[in-house]
């Protein structure tokens, strides 16, 4: 990738992570709706939004070719399942007063990305970058110890999204086509679940106010746009760089959890936060130095 493409990829990924960090503000407005139903709505309305974008941009050619490709169907079915599980655990955690633990999960994702980049894609890290990763590991370890129990929400979020990022980086499909294929493959299950919920009287559609209806339909837009930005960025920057940009989302979530929702914040959390930001500062400084050196060369 050219430096211009890499710069655009970094901006897209940063915008995506900032939006994800603010998501608790959105999902808290739908706390009375079960997480499973919210995720089904995300699938249905995300697919509708993606199809509208395809129609506006004449993007059905690549989409049709992807539907005829068995490897594309297999890989994106897997990435769709990983994404769905990640969404489900995240929304459940946010609406059950676990915003800080969801932030812990996404603090772990960059470490998973760096490990995958090194082990699977054979990306090399410079010495200062290793020190930065060590600081992040120390910070996350303090967070894990401070929880006092197995943080299953955090571990599930880290594992599923780390694997999803790797699959999307390897996919030859464009961001819009890839997201459309993922949502289409799981659309029948999501629609069937919503119809069953409505039939049994447990669904939200037609039984909540106008505001929640708008938010349910809008879930497709607020879901699709950050994912498109993520897929665009993931294909244009190194996986390790993508992993460190990921810290934007949990940092915003962390702030929301402590200062907006007033979840418990211990001394262990404060120490861990300091270690993580120290690692980020080292990594950022090293990247800036390397880019300046490359420019001079």
Image (tube, grey):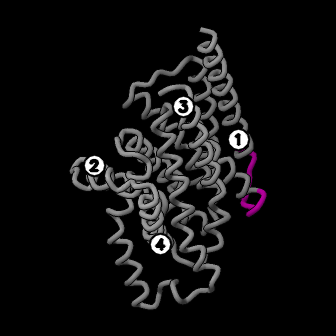
Q: Mark 1 points at which residue?
A: 273
Q: Examine the image and state in which quarter residue 212 appears.
A: bottom right
Residue closer to the observer: 57 or 281: 57
Rate crowding at label 4 as few (under 14), some (14 to 19) or many (20 or more) other CA atoms within 10 Å: many
Label whose residue precedes the other's in the sequence (4 or 1): 4
Of residues 162 and 47, the one drawn nearer to the viewer in this rendering: 47
Label 2 vs 1, first from the N-terminus: 2
122 is higher (above) or lower (below) than 275: above
Helix, strand or loop at label 4? It is helix
Magenta region's main secondary structure?
loop
Q: What stretch is highlighted in magenta?
A: 259-268
Tell me where residue 237 appears, x and y as whole percent.
51, 33
- In the image, which disc is placed on residue 82? none
Q: What element carries label 3?
A: helix
- Residue 197 seen from this side: yes
Please report contact status of discs 2 and 1: CB closer than 8 Å, yes or no.
no
| Residue drawn at 75 percent across, 46 percent down | 267
């Amino acid at each position: 990738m050219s430096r211009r493409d890499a710069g655009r990829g970094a901006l897209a990924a940063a915008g995506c992570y900032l939006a994800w960090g603010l998501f608790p503000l959105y999902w808290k407005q739908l706390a009375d709706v079960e997480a499973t139903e919210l995720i089904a709505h995300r699938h249905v309305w995300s697919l509708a939004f993606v199809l509208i974008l395809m129609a506006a941009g004449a993007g059905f050619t690549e989409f049709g070719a992807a539907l005829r490709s068995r490897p594309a169907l297999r890989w994106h079915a897997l990435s769709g399942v990983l994404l769905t599980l990640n969404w489900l655990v995240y929304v459940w955690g946010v609406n059950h007063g676990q915003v800080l633990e969801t932030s812990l999960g996404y603090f772990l994702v960059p470490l998973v990305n760096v490990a995958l980049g090194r082990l699977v894609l054979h990306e090399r890290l410079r010495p200062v970058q290793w020190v930065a990763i060590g600081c992040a590991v120390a910070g996350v370890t303090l967070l894990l110890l401070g929880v006092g129990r197995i943080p299953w929400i955090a571990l599930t979020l880290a594992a599923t999204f780390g694997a999803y990022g790797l699959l999307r980086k390897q996919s030859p499909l464009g961001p819009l086509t890839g997201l459309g294929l993922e949502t289409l493959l799981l659309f029948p299950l999501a629609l069937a679940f919503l119809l069953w919920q409505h039939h049994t009287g447990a669904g939200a559609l037609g039984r909540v106010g106008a505001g929640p209806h708008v938010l349910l339909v809008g879930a497709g837009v607020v879901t699709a746009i950050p994912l498109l930005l993520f897929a665009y960025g993931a294909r244009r920057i190194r996986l390790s760089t993508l992993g460190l940009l990921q810290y934007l989302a949990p940092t915003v979530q962390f702030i929301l959890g402590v200062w907006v929702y007033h979840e418990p914040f211990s001394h262990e959390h404060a120490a861990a936060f300091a270690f993580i930001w120290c690692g980020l500062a080292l990594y950022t400084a090293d990247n800036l130095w390397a880019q300046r050196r490359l420019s001079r060369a």
